[in-house]
Image (spheres, helix red, strand yellow):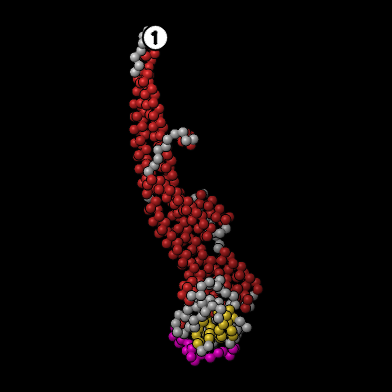
Amino acid sequence: FTEEKFGQAEKTELDAHFENLLARADSTKNWTERILRQTEVLLQPNPSARVEEFLYEKLDRKVPSRVTNGELLAQYMAEAASELGPTTPYGKTLLMVSEAEKRLGAAERDFIHTASISFLTPLRNFLEGDWKTISKERRLLQNRRLDLDACKARLKKAKAAEAKASCEGDTVPDFQETRPRNYILSASASALWNDEVDKAEQELRVAQTEFDRQAEVTRLLLEGISSTHVNHLRCLHEFVKSQTTYYAQCYRHMLDLQKQLGSAQGAIFPGTFVGTTEPASPPLSSTSPTTAAATMPVVPTVASLAPPGEAALCLEEVAPSASGTRKARVLYDYEAADSSELALLADELITVYSLPGMDPDWLIGERGNKKGKVPVTYLELLS
């Protein structure tokens, strides 16, 4: 090994396919470690908590249940409402938001649990199980290769010495000028090197057999990386499924909360608009309605949110409410889902107003002689 590092010994090279298998295995191991670590950061951003969970796992002890940030915020809001007055408008709102945050925290807890089992655990099993086996066999293959190279070097030296001794032994001695003892010693050395060559050749055959056997074992393990990729792909699908479920639950909880807050605000401040004057997300660089519809969150239509049996609004008969109309600037492009909605273009100004009993997430918008329902989240209400 030392002579190889100094370039003083020949090294048995592996075939190109074997080298490719080694490179793919190393790449799989490195990226699996990175994905595992970053997923742990995603599920638990607190580094101290991650260290604590790691120690519990190493000690084979159950990780204690931890309150999520959403559940802790819900607790603080509920305590604040109790102290500030649960019957006041602020207290009532705190209680409503507290319940929503509690549900968000529970959804987050379920997501972390599901993702840990379906995604993190298989990745850890590969690194702590299959990869350790592969590394062990690779180290053993390295030792077998070094043994093989040492036998090749020993045989090469023995053959060189044998050839030198044979050349000296082929010379016919002149008994009047040289002593017969030199000739006898040369013949004896040649015989000794012949034995050494035979022994080195036998050791080389044994070393070559062991190297070939270990190379085959290692090759089978490295080819198993393809099965590992298939397993990780299946786990990745499970992770995406759990993440989709989690964000869908969050969106549904926040949509319900927005409805509750809109109803409560309408009861406290009658005749006012329910909505926000801040954009819900950064403006889109593209003005294509198709692109906007694909990237912006889906906003339920009024008809889909209306109670069963409630008739849809007849836009031709709709008149502005008693509270009057307001101007609104469109934040994003919006493609109308049906004929009752009004398509919007970013940065245009439209006239909007609400109707009694209308869903707080929607307003009636007018542009010239066109009229239709528009989502509040796409608007910035002006004076």
Most foreground residue, 189 or 317: 189
Residue 86 visible in the picture? no
- Give, as a single range, the part of the protein colored magenta: 304-324
Question: Residue at (51%, 63%) from the top-left corner?
Answer: 109
Residue 109 visible in the picture? yes
Q: Which residue is mark 1?
A: 177
Most foreground residue, 42 or 190: 190
> Which quadrant, please, contains the C terminus?
bottom right
Residue 111: x and y in percent read: 48, 63
Question: Residue at (43%, 60%) from the top-left corner?
Answer: 236
Badge 1: residue crowd in 10 Å (few <14, some 14–19, many ≥20): few
Is residue 317 one of those drawn in magenta?
A: yes
Q: Specify the amino acid type for callout 1.
A: Glu
Image height of 375 relative to 181, above or below: below
State left or right for residue 52 relative to residue 237: right
State left or right for residue 89 relative to residue 154: right
Most foreground residue, 272 or 14: 14
Question: Residue at (57%, 64%) from the top-left corner?
Answer: 69
- Residue 72: quarter of image: bottom right
Residue 174: x and y in percent read: 36, 11
Image height of 202 relative to 358, above or below: above
Residue 278: x and y in percent read: 59, 75
State left or right for residue 15 relative to residue 54: left
Label 1 sits on a secondary structure element that is loop
Question: Residue at (47%, 56%) from the top-left corner?
Answer: 120
Is residue 356 one of those drawn in magenta?
A: no
Q: How many marks?
A: 1
Q: Residue furthest top?
A: 176
